Amino acid sequence: MMHSAHTRSLLLVLSAGVLWSTVGLGIRLIQDADVWQILLYRSISLSIFLYIVIYIRSRVSPFQQIIHAGLPGVIAGLSLVGAYAGGIYAIQHTSVANAMLLFAAAPFLAAILGWAVIGERVYKGTWISICFAMLGIAIMVGNQTFDSSLNGSLAALGSALGFAAFTVTLRWGKEAEMLPSVFLSGIFGVVITAMICTGLGLSFVISAQDSGISIGMGIFQVGAGLVLYTLGSKSLPAVELTLMSLGEVLLAPLWVWLLLGETVTSNILAGGCILLGAIAGNAIFGSRTRPPALL
């Protein structure tokens, strides 16, 4: 019985990773929409989807739940908005492989933030893994000049920092459930992106293809992925969650290579291998906490 429950949890988390891995392909298929227009539509659909899911699960309005989250919930929600925006911009301006590999640095950034902000202990193995991860990142971005590609890499690291801040804030606020904070991030996303679109003179109306993809990403890629991850991760140890997160990082470039023919440079491959090795090594020898969910 325990074995079947463990297998079910693995399948749920694996399914979440498969959904999350489609983010690069989805953004690549968008034709004209700006990062803020994409995030606006994605935030609207995410908020509606999570409102329904949270209410069905708890029979309590998500708005009541986020009131109890307090300041940590607000910071967590805002952190995710920044992570989402950085992630979309990164994929629009650099290769999907480069962006996804840099997103994968989030667990290490979370370890550093947890140590610096809330005094969490970082184990020796994790510090060693962080050093190797920094080496891998340096190799990946070292030959990029001050152009769109470097901006995309910096945005990807900023996105990873946002995911890390979200994870640390949940631990600071001792929130066992992440969905209400993600719902709050959707609400913040709608308000903030609507204001930015108005300020930049961007239209609230985009093409049917762009709006359909953006709405679909909010429901399936982010929303359904998070629900599956939440259901499956409760009974899995950190090492398995971290190792399974590598599947998402590897699948995302595979989809755009198979369907769109996008390739990667040797620097990204070499640095990415070191970074993935650092993540795997930390999962086996150094990690004691769950990795942040990569959205």
Image (cartoon, grey):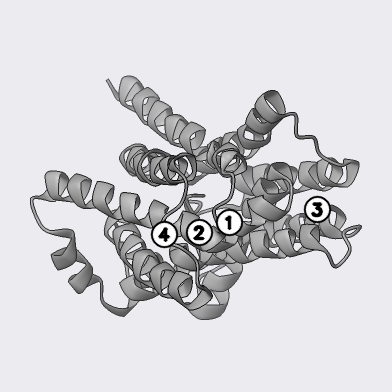
Q: Return the residue at label 3.
A: 136
Q: Residues within 10 Å of mark 2 (few under 14, many from 20)?
A: many
Residue type at mark 2: give it.
Answer: Tyr
Q: Does residue 149 lie above or below 217 as drawn?
A: below
The answer to whether residue 104 is left or right of residue 82 is right
Count of residue discs: 4
Which residue occupies the foreground of this view, 212 or 247? 212
Label 4, secondary structure: give it: helix
Q: Return the residue at label 4.
A: 40
Q: Return the residue at label 1.
A: 87
Quick check: can you spot residue 239? yes
Residue type at mark 1: give it.
Answer: Gly
Residue 123 in percent (x, y) is at 61, 61
Mark toward the viewer: 3 or 1: 1
Q: CA distance from mark 1 to mark 2?
A: 5 Å
Q: Residue at horizontal 37%, vertical 28%?
A: 6
Q: Return the residue at label 2.
A: 84
Residue type at mark 3: give it.
Answer: Gly
Image quadrant where one finds the N terminus: top left
Label 1, secondary structure: give it: helix
